[in-house]
Image (cartoon, rainbow, N blue to C red):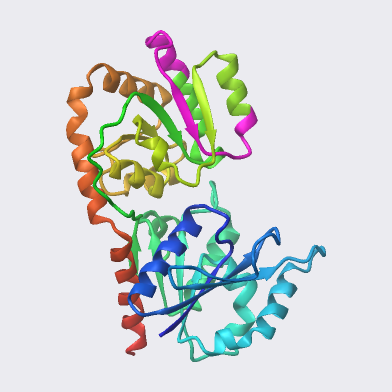
Amino acid sequence: MNLLFFVSSFYPQIGGVERSVYFVSRELCKLGFNVKIITQNIDNKSKNFEIFPEGFSVYRIPSIKIPKTGILQKWIWLIFHINLIAKSHIIHFHDYTPFVKWFLPFRFIFLKKKYFITFHGYEGFPIKFKHIFYRRLAEKLTNGNICVGEFIKRWYRTNPDKIYFAAVDYTEDSNDYSEKDIFFYGRLEKDTDITFYIQAIKLLQKKLDNKICFKIIGDGSLRKSVLNFLDENKINYEFLGFQENPTQFLKNAKIVLTSSYLSILESLSLGKIVISFYSNNLKRDYLKSFPGADSIFYVYEDPKFVASRIEDIIRNSHKYEHLKVEGKNLAKEMSWAKVAEKYVALYNKYIKK
């Protein structure tokens, strides 16, 4: 069966959506789907066409630097590649942008196609009306949808067919690692609450007489301000920046501070103690709805509580050994193969009609 994915960005750009599309595509290829991905060539440095070893192919729409012509460029490209649409049995969009802003006119040309959409994450807080409108429009004009997280039902009033949170490729690792450092793992942006995490590290430093090493995996627009804060407060840290393979570093973590589904699950799969922080009600619902919240990993809204919990973990680590086992057990149950099964079940539900 020919399956066509649309996604705003894809490898070599790496983020939560890009990784999800990659792994789901890999698993669907294993199940016999002929998967093609349409995305944009953001910097024109990647190949416009590429076949990945996992079996799926990627078409990147070139970017021509002419102001206010971005959508028109997408339409022209799709017209010249209309066979990709015509020969697809299923067309699936990842978030509303490629559907509403790239594909919408073609939706009314190919009326008999089966259309689906996955809603990943959120666009920021507070939520703007236009984001709710575009999501509702995409939901109405597609046959079915998948939501990444329970919170989407409440905050966007979406009626999901399927829900999942995250997934990992779990592998047993019997090696012993030096688990002593505190890691932040995520983008250095406002929505990851990095500024609150480093406030907690500042409080912790005073309690433990500078006997901590704080390491940062990730990058973003707040890098300069974050590093300045750490320098000004004489915090012992190491900035590792963006890493394509963060696992090799996270294995040596004792505690991981992170706020996204994929990062939480990846850390739990490695047997790490995870602490997440929220600064608004949307992020609270996002985190609290994740399996194991407040039982397998901790969720707080105050840097003081984060600092106190880290201190207790460091001083009384034996009390937390059970969390490492429970985290690994949770990760074993949340595989990309199971996520792919949700996609197939969604397709079968509507294609049989």
Instruction: Reply yes or no: does residue 344 show up in magenta.
Output: no
Position of residue 2 measured from the top left corner of the image (x, y, whole percent): 45, 84
Kindly identify the residue that appears in the image at 53 percent across and 46 percent down: 125
Q: Nearer the viewer, residue 313 or 114?
A: 313
Instruction: Reply yes or no: does residue 221 show up in magenta.
Output: yes
In this rendering, the answer to whether 158 lies above or below 249 is below
Kindly identify the residue that appears in the image at 32 percent across and 49 percent down: 289
Would you say 136 lies left or right of 327 here?
right
Position of residue 44 measured from the top left corner of the image (x, y, whole percent): 71, 62
- Residue 284 falls in image quadrant: top left
Q: Residue furthest right?
A: 66
Residue 277, visible in the rendered structure: no
Q: Where is the N terminus found, in terms of image quarters?
A: bottom left
Kindly identify the residue that appears in the image at 18 percent across and 23 percent down: 318
Q: Nearer the viewer, residue 49 or 161?
A: 49
Kindly identify the residue that appears in the image at 61 percent across and 77 percent down: 103
Q: Nearer the viewer, residue 192 or 302?
A: 192
- Residue 293 falls in image quadrant: top left
Would you say 281 lies left or right of 129 here?
left
Residue 137, visible in the rendered structure: yes
Position of residue 22 measured from the top left corner of the image (x, y, whole percent): 45, 63
In this rendering, the answer to whether 151 lies above or below 85 is above
Which residues fall within the magenta stretch? 202-224
Q: Nearer the viewer, residue 243 or 228?
A: 243
Would you say 46 lies left or right of 283 here?
right
